[in-house]
Amino acid sequence: MSPNTTPQAPFIAVSESYLIPANTSPTESAIGLIPAPTMTKLRNVGLPRIKDMRATGVTMQIVSHIPVHANPLSCAKINDALNAAIYVSPDRFAAMALLPALDAKEAARELQRCVTKYKFVGGVLGLREDVRVDDMDFEELWGIAETYRVPVALKEVWPTLDQTRDFRGYVPEALLGPLVANFNAARVSSPLPILQLYAAGVFDRHPNLRLIVSRSGLLIASLLPRIKSLFTTLPASQRPNRSFLDIWQHNFYISTEDVLDLGSMRALLEQIPMDRVMYGANYPFEEGGKALMAELKESGIVGREEWERIASGNAEALFGLGTAKGGKSTMGRSSY
């Protein structure tokens, strides 16, 4: 099927990054290692970014700040700045709030504040080794997300400078930034937090909780038989009420920013319902998303309607976006 006979659906990119221009991290984040051209794009949510979006067929970005080590006050300032940055372009941008992972109670309050005040469409929780997302302190956060019907994205937090020593070794200094930007998530991502949430009964208590994952989701997809086998060894009284396959198919969404080739895309689509997969371009770190989607369209792995759902329809449904004439997704947003 050629591009001339198949209409091109506008892309809604769901995992796009932003960096507050005045960013100062008290924990000395390694953000300074990001190459200067990428840094410039990260800090801009204006016409240059919109121009890049047009070039790649993206009509709307779901934007969130790079996950960093930040306290509740810093998260609030970051979210205030993001709302101000995107406020003039509601047809181009929607936002997810950065949540303070070390303070679960404040994370719940910040999600509620940003959803009710700014009409943010979800939250981002940075995964850290010193944070257990299955802790009961997070119950309020899951409840808020469920009540307001907004998803929470689980993302690997950006490393501190001290944590980048694993990347250093004998590599050229010029390679350090690209290594961190491209491979930090691969180094620290793990399916363990997802399994802990399931084993702790979070999805039994919050059956309508919706979580977005990327790299850790790809790992889960390949481990489904092992996970099923693991939990069937437990006595029935110690298992969650729902099967892992059930929560995997109904509570999780996967963005495709870490799906880099057609083989990986095919494998993913065999392991999760089509309506749970959303296009993610990983702007401004990646540039190959549009080409991969074109390859997917030509491959015959999915039909036209399924392809369009991955490109934009699933994101519209999850984030509550309305589609106006001309293919532009719009939503209401409160003033700053």
Image (spheres, grey):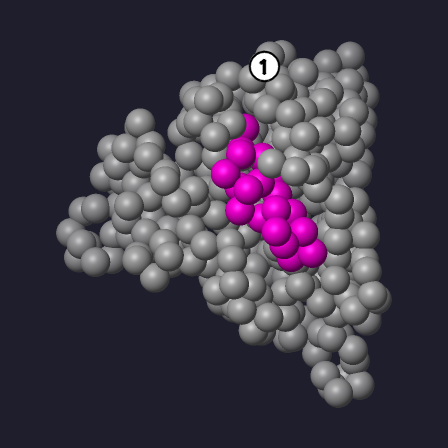
- Left or right: residue 213 versus residue 246 is left
Label 1: how many Cα within 10 Å (few below 14, some 14–19, many 20+): some
Residue 94, magenta (yes or no): yes
Picture quarter containing residue 157?
top left
Residue located 67% across and 16% down the image: 139
Relative depth, front residue between 299 and 226? 299
Instruction: Note whether residue 309 is visible.
Output: yes
The percent coordinates of residue 236 (x first, y second) are: 79, 17
The image shows residue 326 at horizontal and vertical percentages of 79, 69
User: Is residue 205 shown in magenta?
Assistant: no
Residue 17: x percent and y percent?
A: 50, 49
| Residue 312: x %, y % from top left | 73, 59
Q: Residue at x 71, y 29 (%)?
A: 116
Q: Which residues are magenta?
A: 80-99
**Which residue in the protein does label 1 denote?**
105
Please name the residue shown 25% across and 52% down the image.
176
